[in-house]
Image: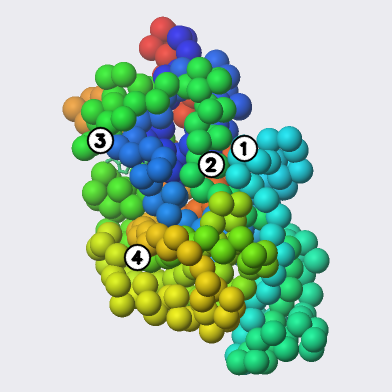
């Protein structure tokens, strides 16, 4: 059988990392990334890129923990290598603060991040409105540099990149044996997934290089995440809103909320407003599917619906998607040997 041809639809963090896992696991495949938008125009470019998972109801906790752990381990190694500056990955320490005792004393990811512990009384003096908190060190991606770094690694492995909107996965059937669907919120239209919905997020990217520690209000709505090039101030979570236009009232509200947590931000400069649509679902769709149409078959692997946790989970889900691509390759070999009988 000739080398399988695989197309990954999508060039956000999920598509690029999935393509990289496929290229690393099956180097004999001919691989292409096909996407309507590349960095800096994807939802992944808007994200803060913090490795703090959100719990999703439809996936067992041990699976979410496994995805997070694999992603953390992968980015830990990059952050600890000469690649760190170019990949835009770094360690960041800080505080998650609460006005009342959180329901969950120990989040499932507490033993994956580094040095997770309750905040001391002295630390809590910085947050007079809050009664308790947790301190830890995690990892963060500066998103556009990380996406560019993934693209560079893919190109070095001979992966082709095509800018193209795919209206229907069958369009790719004449050129590819396997299609991997990493279209993010685009999967709503591309495969008609009614369980997938947008959760709009508005953030500010500001210049405030003196802010070195992250601060996250326990409900996760207000946050200050320092990166290499800017500090991300958030945020909003607006379910079912498809609007990509920044709302000036929301900008003011985010800025005020963040200044209440970190008053020095009043001196922040060069404020840029960004909006993105989190591809949300009760669970990530990580699944193999065989589509049939008039006797023709198309092997598809879905990997989308990462909601608020695309960066936190990307490497773990990419590895699982690559495993499903391996099952598709085995099925192709089976079809081809049966055809010869
Ligand atoms: C404000 C905000 C802050 C966030 N902060 C964090 C954070 O700190 N940590 C974290 O883990 N997560 C965070 N997230 C969530 C994270 O951004 C997403 O989970 C992640 O970006 C999803 O990645 P993706 O690759 O699935 O989607 P996208 O980045 O949206 O990529 C989808 C790709 O598919 C392509 N595509 C779609 N439809 C088609 C089509 N029909 N044909 C061809 N191409 C198509 C698009 O052009 C694009 O290339 C945040 C999100 C927002 C909005």
- Which residue corresponds to mark 2? 145
Q: Closer to us: mark 4 or mark 2?
A: 2
- Which residue corresponds to mark 1? 86
Q: Residue at x 54, y 84 (%)?
A: 260
Q: Secondary structure at mark 4?
A: strand
Q: In the shown orientation, is residue 232 left or right of residue 194?
A: right
How far apart are labels 3 and 2 at the CA level?
23 Å
How far apart are labels 3 and 4 at the CA level?
22 Å
Image coords of residue 270 (percent x, y):
44, 60
Q: In the shown orientation, is residue 248 left or right of residue 79?
A: left
Image coords of residue 45 (percent x, y):
44, 49
Q: Secondary structure at mark 2?
A: helix
* Label 3 beta carbon less than 8 Å to ligand 1: yes
- Which residue corresponds to mark 3? 165
**Crowd around label 1: few <14 · some 14–19 · many ≥20 (10 Å):** some
- Which residue corresponds to mark 4? 200
How far apart are labels 4 and 2 at the CA level?
23 Å
Q: Secondary structure at mark 3?
A: loop
Q: Residue at x 55, y 20 (%)?
A: 157
- Name the N-terminal-most of marks 3 and 4: 3
């Amino acid at each position: 059988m000739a080398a399988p041809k695989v197309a990954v639809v999508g060039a956000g963090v999920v598509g690029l990392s999935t393509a990289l896992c496929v290229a690393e696991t099956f180097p004999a495949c001919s691989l292409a990334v096909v996407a309507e938008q590349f960095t800096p125009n994807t939802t992944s470019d808007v994200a803060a890129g913090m490795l703090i998972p959100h719990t999703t109801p439809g996936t067992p906790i041990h699976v979410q923990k496994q995805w997070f752990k694999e992603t953390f381990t992968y980015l830990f190694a990059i952050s600890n290598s000469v690649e760190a500056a170019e990949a835009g990955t770094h360690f960041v320490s800080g505080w998650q603060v609460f006005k009342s005792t959180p329901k969950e004393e120990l989040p499932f990811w507490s033993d994956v991040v580094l040095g997770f512990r309750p905040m001391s009384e002295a630390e809590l003096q910085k947050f007079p409105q809050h009664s308790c908190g947790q301190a830890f060190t995690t990892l963060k991606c500066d998103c556009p540099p990380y996406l560019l770094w993934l693209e560079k690694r893919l190109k070095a492995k001979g992966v082709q990149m095509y800018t193209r909107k795919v209206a229907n996965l069958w369009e790719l059937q004449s050129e590819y044996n396997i299609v991997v669907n990493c279209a993010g919120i685009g999967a709503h239209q591309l495969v008609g997934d009614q369980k997938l919905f947008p959760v709009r997020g508005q953030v500010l990217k500001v210049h405030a290089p003196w802010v070195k520690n992250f601060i996250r209000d326990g409900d996760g709505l207000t946050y200050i995440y320092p990166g290499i090039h800017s500090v991300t101030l958030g945020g909003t979570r607006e379910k079912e809103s498809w609007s990509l236009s920044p709302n000036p009232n929301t900008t003011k509200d985010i800025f005020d909320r963040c200044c209440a947590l970190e008053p020095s931000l009043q001196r922040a400069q060069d404020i840029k407003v960004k909006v993105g649509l989190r591809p949300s679902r009760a669970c990530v769709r990580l699944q193999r599917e065989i589509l049939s149409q008039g006797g023709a078959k198309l092997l598809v692997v879905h990997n989308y619906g990462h909601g608020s946790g695309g960066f936190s989970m990307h490497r773990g889900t990419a590895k699982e998607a690559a495993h499903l691509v391996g099952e598709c390759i085995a099925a192709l070999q089976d079809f081809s040997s049966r055809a010869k009988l």
